C-alpha cells in the first residue's frame, strides 16, 4: 500500500503540466503490464493548471465531510469516489485523482462515446480480428451478422472484448474510436484519462482515475439505452453459419437482485488493474454513483462494498457540505431510464404529452394548426375546381381586365 503523498499545488501556467499527466514507467519487462504499479501517478489538474473538482480532491488519502461518521469497514479499493449524480456533489473519496488501469469499466466510456453514433437496429458483420480479441468474449462469430443492440448487450452483460472491438470497427475503426473516446473524455472534463483500447485491456499508458470514471458513469446513466442494455438479464445471440445460438447472462445479477435501489453496474479485472467497479444506486430519492479502483473482492464482494459506501453517504445529515464536485456538463436525468420504459434501439420511448401539446398551445400546437389550415385550403381549392368542372368552362370577361 502506497503511502499518501502531499497534494500537488495547482499552477496557473498551462505549460507546468501535461493533460493527461505522463504515464508511469513499467515495473516489468513485458509489453503489457503483469503487475500493478505500486506508485501510480496522480492527476487532478486541468488544462490551465486548475484543481479539477476542488482542491480537497487532490489528496492521495481519504477526504470526508466534516463531522462525518466512521467509514464502513472492509472497503478494499486503493481509490474510490462516491457522488450524488443528480447534484454533482462528491460526498467522499480516497485518492480520487490517482491514475490507475481501468480494466473493463472503461467500456462505460466506450458506450458513452458510441451510443449516439450507432443506431440499435443497424446490422454489423463481425471481423475476424474482432472475434479473436483476447480476454472475455460475448461469443461473436467472425463473419456473423448482429444488430448493434445485440453487440452492446454483449459489451455490458458479459464484458465482451470482442463486442468492444466490433463496435469500434462499426464506428469507423479502432484508432478512430480511440480518438473519439479521448475527445469525449476531455469534453466531459476528464483530464486524468488516456485511452488506448476500446475494451479496457491493459497498457501502461492507458490510465484513468476514480474521479474521471465517475464523470463517465454519470454521463452513461443519463442515456436510457445504456441503462436498458445494462439491466438486461439475459440475451440469446442468433445462430450464425455453423455456430449455434449463444445465451448470455448478465454478470451483475447479484448486484441487481440483492442491492435495494440498484440501477446499473460494470465490473472489470486485469492483473494490473486488479478489480474495478462502477455502479449506480438510488437511495432516499437520490441517485448515487460509486467507483472502486484497484479493489479486492474479499472479505466482501465489490458490489457489497459499493452499496455500503452509498448507504453511508445517503445517511449523512441533510445539508452536509460535499468534499468536491463533478465538473462536467450537467446530465439530464431521463425519465425513461428510471421508469423502465427505455428502448434499446436508439431513443427513449415517447414521453407523455405535455399540457401545452394537449391543449394545442406552444410550438407543437402551432404546427398542428398550420397543417389543418393547409389541408382545409387544399380541400377548398379541390372542391371549387370540381364544381367549375361540373358547370362547364368559365365565361370570358369583357374588357382588358387584369392580366
Image (spheres, rainbow, N blue to C red):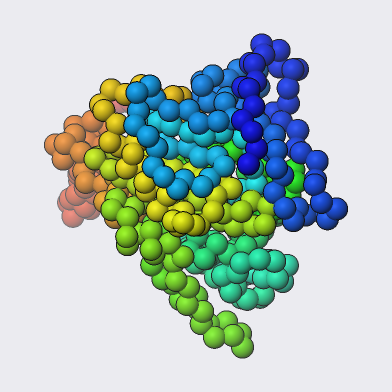
Residue 286, by quadrant, is top left
Counting from the top left corner in percent of width and height, residue 14 is at 71, 17
Q: Is 324 situated above or below 204?
A: above
Relative to 42, 146 lies left or right: left
Counting from the top left corner in percent of width and height, residue 234 is at 41, 71
Counting from the top left corner in percent of width and height, residue 287 is at 33, 40
Residue at the image point whose x is 80% and y is 41% from the top: 25
Residue at the image point whose x is 72% and y is 44% from the top: 37
Residue 19, by quadrant, is top right
One can see residue 341 in this view: no
Q: Is 13 situated above or below 295?
A: above
* Nearer to us in this view, 17 or 123: 17
Residue 160, by quadrant, is bottom right
* Nearer to us in this view, 157 or 141: 157
* Tally of numbered tags: 0
Residue lying farthest to the left in this orientation: 359
Residue at the image point whose x is 74% and y is 17% from the top: 16
Residue at the image point whose x is 63% and y is 41% from the top: 1
Relative to 265, 313 lies left or right: left
Residue lying farthest to the top in this orientation: 12
Relative to 333, 179 lies left or right: right
Amino acid at each position: 500500500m502506497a503511502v499518501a503523498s502531499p497534494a500537488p499545488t495547482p499552477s496557473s501556467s498551462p505549460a507546468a503540466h501535461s493533460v493527461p499527466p505522463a504515464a508511469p514507467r513499467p515495473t516489468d519487462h513485458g509489453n503489457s503490464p503483469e503487475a500493478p504499479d505500486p506508485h501510480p501517478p496522480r492527476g487532478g489538474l486541468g488544462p490551465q493548471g486548475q484543481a479539477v473538482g476542488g482542491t480537497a480532491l487532490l489528496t492521495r488519502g481519504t477526504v470526508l465531510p466534516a463531522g462525518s461518521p466512521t467509514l464502513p469497514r472492509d472497503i478494499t479499493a486503493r481509490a474510490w469516489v462516491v457522488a450524488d449524480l443528480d447534484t454533482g456533489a462528491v460526498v467522499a473519496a480516497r485518492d480520487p485523482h490517482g491514475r490507475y488501469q481501468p480494466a473493463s469499466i472503461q467500456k462505460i466510456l466506450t458506450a458513452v462515446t458510441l451510443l449516439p453514433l450507432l443506431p440499435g437496429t443497424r446490422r454489423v458483420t463481425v471481423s475476424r480480428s474482432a472475434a479473436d480479441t483476447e480476454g472475455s468474449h460475448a461469443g461473436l462469430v467472425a463473419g456473423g451478422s448482429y444488430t448493434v443492440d445485440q453487440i452492446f448487450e454483449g459489451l455490458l452483460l458479459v464484458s465482451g472484448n470482442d463486442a468492444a472491438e466490433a463496435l469500434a470497427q462499426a464506428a469507423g475503426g479502432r484508432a478512430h474510436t480511440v480518438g473519439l473516446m479521448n475527445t469525449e473524455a476531455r469534453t466531459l472534463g476528464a483530464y486524468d484519462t488516456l485511452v488506448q483500447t476500446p475494451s479496457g485491456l491493459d497498457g501502461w499508458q492507458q490510465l484513468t482515475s476514480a474521479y474521471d470514471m465517475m464523470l463517465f458513469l454519470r454521463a452513461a446513466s443519463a442515456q436510457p439505452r445504456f441503462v436498458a442494455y445494462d439491466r438486461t438479464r439475459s440475451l440469446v445471440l442468433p445462430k450464425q453459419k455453423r455456430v449455434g445460438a449463444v445465451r448470455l447472462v448478465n454478470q451483475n445479477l447479484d448486484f441487481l437482485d440483492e442491492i435495494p435501489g440498484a440501477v446499473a453496474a460494470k465490473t472489470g479485472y486485469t492483473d494490473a488493474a486488479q478489480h474495478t467497479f462502477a455502479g449506480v444506486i438510488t437511495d432516499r430519492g437520490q441517485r448515487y454513483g460509486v467507483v472502486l479502483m484497484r479493489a479486492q473482492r474479499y472479505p466482501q464482494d465489490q458490489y457489497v462494498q459499493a452499496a455500503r459506501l452509498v448507504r453511508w453517504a445517503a445517511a449523512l445529515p441533510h445539508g452536509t457540505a460535499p468534499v468536491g464536485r463533478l465538473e462536467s456538463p450537467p446530465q439530464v436525468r431521463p425519465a425513461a431510464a428510471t421508469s423502465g420504459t427505455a428502448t434499446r434501439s436508439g431513443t427513449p420511448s415517447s414521453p407523455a404529452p405535455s399540457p401545452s401539446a394537449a391543449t394545442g398551445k406552444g410550438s407543437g400546437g402551432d404546427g398542428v394548426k398550420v397543417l389543418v389550415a393547409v389541408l382545409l385550403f387544399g380541400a377548398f381549392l379541390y372542391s371549387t375546381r370540381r364544381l367549375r368542372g361540373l358547370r362547364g368552362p368559365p365565361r370570358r370577361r369583357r374588357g382588358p381586365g387584369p392580366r
